[in-house]
Image: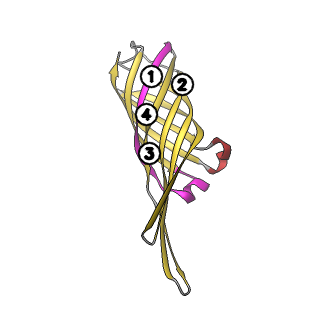
Amino acid sequence: APVADSAAASKMILGVDGAFQLPFGDLADATGMGFGALLRFEYNVMPQLNLTARVGYIYSLNKEISQTVPLMGTIKAKYGMDNIPIWVGAKYFLTDMIYGGVEVGANMLKGKVDMNGVSASSTETKFGANVGAGVLLSGLDLRAQLEILNLSEAGKSMALMVNVGYNFLAF
C-alpha cells in the first residue's frame, strides 16, 4: 500500500502534475518538445490499487523549416501539435513508494502551421494509451511513461513523458 504518501489513508486524492513530453520517431518530425500540466484525481479501491483520471493541456514547441524555392524566394514554415489529454487508468503499488501505471483515453490533438505569416490549425481526437512507472518521494509523485497518442498509428505517435506531481487535497 502507498503508506509512504501522507494521503495514503484517504480514499480520494486531488493532485496536479507538471509534464515534460519528448516526442520521438515520426512524431518528433511533426512537433517539438511539450510542456504542460494535468489535473489528477485518484480513488483508492484497495490497498495497492488506485483508479485515476487526468485531464490537462500539453503545449508543444514548433518545428521550423526554411527553404529557398526558385522564382518564389524563401519559404518559412512553423508547425507543431498541442494536446488536451483526457485519460483514465490505474496505479498499482509494488511497494510503499513504487508503482506501475496505465492509462487510456482521448487525446484532442491540435495541429498548427504558419507559412510565411499565414496560419491554420485543425483539431482531431484520437484514442491513445500510456504505460509507465513512478515513485512517491516526500509528497512528490515522480512518473515516467511511454505515451502513444494515436493507437491506430502507434509507431508514428510515440513520446516519452515525465511528470512531477503534487497531491494538494486528500479526503
In this figure, which residue is indicated by the disc labeled 1?
42
Q: Which amino acid type is shown beneath numbered disc 4?
A: Leu
Q: Report, in whole angstroms, how far the alpha carbon at label 4 lies from the one at label 3.
A: 17 Å
Q: Earlier in the sequence, mark 2 or mark 3?
A: 3
x, y percent for residue 5: 39, 20
Label 1 residue SS: strand
Camera-side residue of 63 and 111? 111
Label 4 or label 2, whichever lies nearer to me, is 2
In the image, which disc is placed on residue 58?
A: 3
Residue at the spot x=37%, y=18% of the render?
A: 7
Q: Report, in whole angstroms, how far the alpha carbon at label 4 lies from the one at label 2.
A: 15 Å
The C terminus: image quadrant: top left
Q: Earlier in the sequence, mark 2 or mark 1?
A: 1
In this figure, which residue is indicated by the disc labeled 4?
142
x, y percent for residue 160: 53, 45
Task: In the displayed orientation, state which residue is furthest to the bottom.
Answer: 71
Q: Report, in whole angstroms, how far the alpha carbon at label 2 lies from the one at label 1.
A: 8 Å
Q: Are marks 2 and 3 in contact (CB under 8 Å)?
A: no
Quarter residue 104 falls in: top right
Q: Earlier in the sequence, mark 3 or mark 1?
A: 1
Residue 28 visible from this viewpoint: yes
Q: Earlier in the sequence, mark 4 or mark 2?
A: 2
In this figure, which residue is indicated by the disc labeled 2?
90
Up/down of 85 relative to 61, above or below: above
Badge 1, how many Cα within 10 Å: few under 14, some, many 20+?
many
In the image, which disc is placed on residue 133?
A: none
Q: Which amino acid type is shown beneath numbered disc 1?
A: Glu
**Segment tinted magenta in the rendering:** 23-47
x, y percent for residue 137: 39, 28
Label 4 residue SS: strand
Q: Report, in whole angstroms, how far the alpha carbon at label 2 lies from the one at label 3.
A: 21 Å
